Image (cartoon, rainbow, N blue to C red):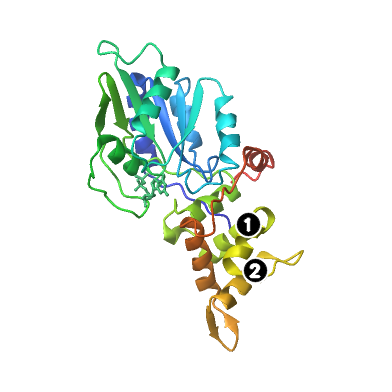
Amino acid sequence: MAIQWFPGHMHLTKKAISERIKEIDVVIELLDARLPGSSANPMLAELTGGKPALKVLNKQDLADPARTPAWLDHYNSQPATRAIELDASATTPARRLIDACHALAPTRGSMVKPMRVLICGIPNVGKSTLINTLTGKRAAKTGDEAGITKLEQRIVLADGFYLWDTPGMLWPRIIVAKSGYNLAASGAIGRNAFNEEEVALELLDYLIQHYPAALQARYKVELPPGITDEQLLEAIGRKRGAVLGKGRINLQKAAEIVIHEFRASTLGRITLETPQEFAGWLAAGQLL
Ligand code: GDP
């Protein structure tokens, strides 16, 4: 069963963004560097159409460093678009953001014509962390679980440089099945909205194909040719003592271990999609 999740109050966010966008010079979209395609909200492009866009591949410290450059090239080859990678907790991200915005809107950024930037991103992508780093505050965090509404705020980043936090919440909009699984694996979706076992199996299926060495190093399991995701989940459960008695494996527990270790990057730095793969999923018509 594919994950389908598009909360009803999204239309309020849509309205708020379309009202704000008239006074905006650059739209910063925070993406998860481990799943840039899936962590984008396709609605944002419709709402902000024509505005210069800065794609920030956040959590780059968790993503595969061999894959991030391909995503940066992908976005940098699009019109009126720039991309940078970032670790939102890095100490001085402001300079790079300011420089990238100036490159996108060179006539803005003075007291007379201030640079007005809107920052958007799906829950859990690192928006609060980035804003807190930029403002040097440890502002109250409303909640770690995806889905808690925050108020709009305006931040002065430099003279003549204003950053607006998105009014409302920009939820992920899952348009292909694989994106739903990747979002769930990353922690972007509330835990009641998906089945852990199913998400772990999808994750393992991808890791068997693309990151077998990381699996072997972490779980000390054999990966004979043709091993299935189900067999691997069982093997991991057995190794970790997730058993129910009579040799039966606690697959739920094993799934939680795999998801947790992916999120915490205990499995290493992993990226769940390349630009080509993501384009392929869209083209394959697995649209929900
Ligand atoms: P928001 O919902 O978009 O505001 O996301 P938060 O700022 O609350 O971040 C969600 C989680 O991701 C928190 O546990 C952060 O500590 C973590 N996080 C944010 N940015 C980064 C980053 O660049 N790297 C890593 N490793 N973790 C990050």
Q: Secondary structure at mark 1?
A: helix
Q: Amino acid at mark 1?
A: Leu
Q: Is mark 1 within 8 Å of ligand 1?
A: no
Residue 230: where, in percent of width, then height?
65, 68
Residue under the point 59% across and 71% down? 236
- Residue 59 visible? The answer is yes
Residue under the point 29% across and 22% down? 161
Q: Quadrant of the N terminus?
A: bottom right
Question: Which of the 4 image quarters holds residue 136?
Answer: top left
The residue wearing badge 2 is: 232
Observer-nearest residue: 8 or 169? 169
How many callouts does the rendering have? 2
Q: Amino acid at mark 2?
A: Leu
- Residue 18 visible? The answer is no
Residue under the point 25% across and 39% down? 151
Residue 207 - label: 1
Residue 261: where, in percent of width, then height?
49, 62
Considering only vertical position in the picture, is 53 above or below 175? above
Considering only vertical position in the picture, is 60 above or below 248? above
Residue 130: where, in percent of width, then height?
34, 39
Considering only vertical position in the picture, is 105 above or below 126? above
Residue 255 - label: none
